[in-house]
Image (spheres, rainbow, N blue to C red):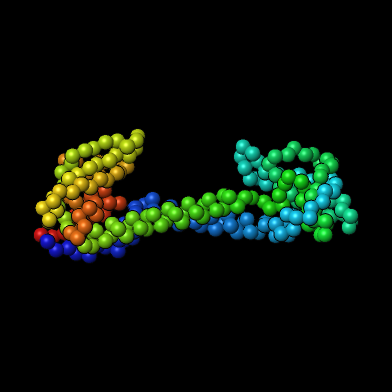
Amino acid sequence: MTKKKLPKDFRILILFNGEWGFGPPILFIFGIVLSINYISTFDLDSFRYLRDDLAIGEGKIINIFDTSIGDENPVFGYDYVFFSPAGEFSWTSYSSKFNYKVGDKVKVEYNAQRPYVHRIQGMSNTLGSSFSLWLFLSVSIGWFLYNTITGLKKLRIIRNGIMIQGNLFNKKSVNAVLTQFSYAFTASDKKKYKVHTRTFEPKKIKDEKHASILYLETDPQQALVVDTLPGLSGKVIKEIWID
């Protein structure tokens, strides 16, 4: 049995582990946007100097505005004047936990050696949270690596595999949208092996009782069900395998 080369667009689709594999790059771009926004509002002086040698002074709220961040717990910006030992300083702190009004007096924490570095006690001078930033970046990178590793394994089986018919021995619903098919097949070493596949589209498997299986002759446990490959990849692979 000979085979032709799988078209490039299908190789890319399989490498990304299907259409959902394009999600991680989108999430990563969104994470970069969050990063730019976070960095642009990051108060480095507060991060450096409002850890030690702190003192408490008094300030006054002069303006309050909605930052449009947070739905259930909206984040507000509080412009204030700080009456420091070195004179008056104006700055903005952010929080979703307080209900101050314009004109309210507030406690201001500051660096005793650098009174120009300050914030309203219990608030932050940086808009946004690094948690959401790292969440988006870590999820997108982890998802991308998983898809890429899975896609590379599938491509290796497709390039070097042997096609054979497998027989269904179990079918079950994993949840409301996911179905698992389990097939048994006999490899070239005359031993029987099993392959399991899960799909959101069980209708793609035209003949549930039998399925085209690709497996590695050197390691038959590495196998895949052709019909469950993303897009029209399964159909194309069947067409390029020529007796």
User: Which quadrant, please, contains the N terminus?
Assistant: bottom left
Residue at the extreme front of the image, as rendered: 53
User: In the image, 42: left or right of 185?
Assistant: right
104 versus 162 height, above or below: above
Q: Which residue is drawn at the image coordinates 68% and 47% (left, top)?
A: 67
User: In the image, 211: left or right of 89?
Assistant: left
Q: Quadrant of residue 158?
A: bottom left
Q: Quadrant of residue 184?
A: top left
The residue nearer to you, when weighing 132 against 242, is: 132
Q: x, y percentage for residue 25?
A: 45, 57
Q: x, y percentage for residue 203?
A: 25, 41
Q: Which residue is drawn at the image coordinates 20% and 55% (left, top)?
A: 220
User: In the image, 120: left or right of 241?
Assistant: right
Using the rendered image of the protein, determine whether residue 13 is visible from the camera's viewpoint. Answer: no
Q: Which residue is drawn at the image coordinates 22% and 53% (left, top)?
A: 221
The residue nearer to you, when weighing 201 against 115, is: 115
Q: Quadrant of residue 205?
A: top left
The residue nearer to you, when weighing 194 against 124, is: 194
100 versus 39 height, above or below: above
Using the rendered image of the protein, determine whether residue 230 is visible from the camera's viewpoint. Answer: yes
Give the number of callouts: 0
Q: Which residue is drawn at the image coordinates 14% and 63% (left, top)?
A: 2
User: Which quadrant, please, contains the C terminus?
Assistant: bottom left
Q: x, y percentage for residue 44?
A: 70, 60
User: In the image, 96: left or right of 56?
Assistant: left
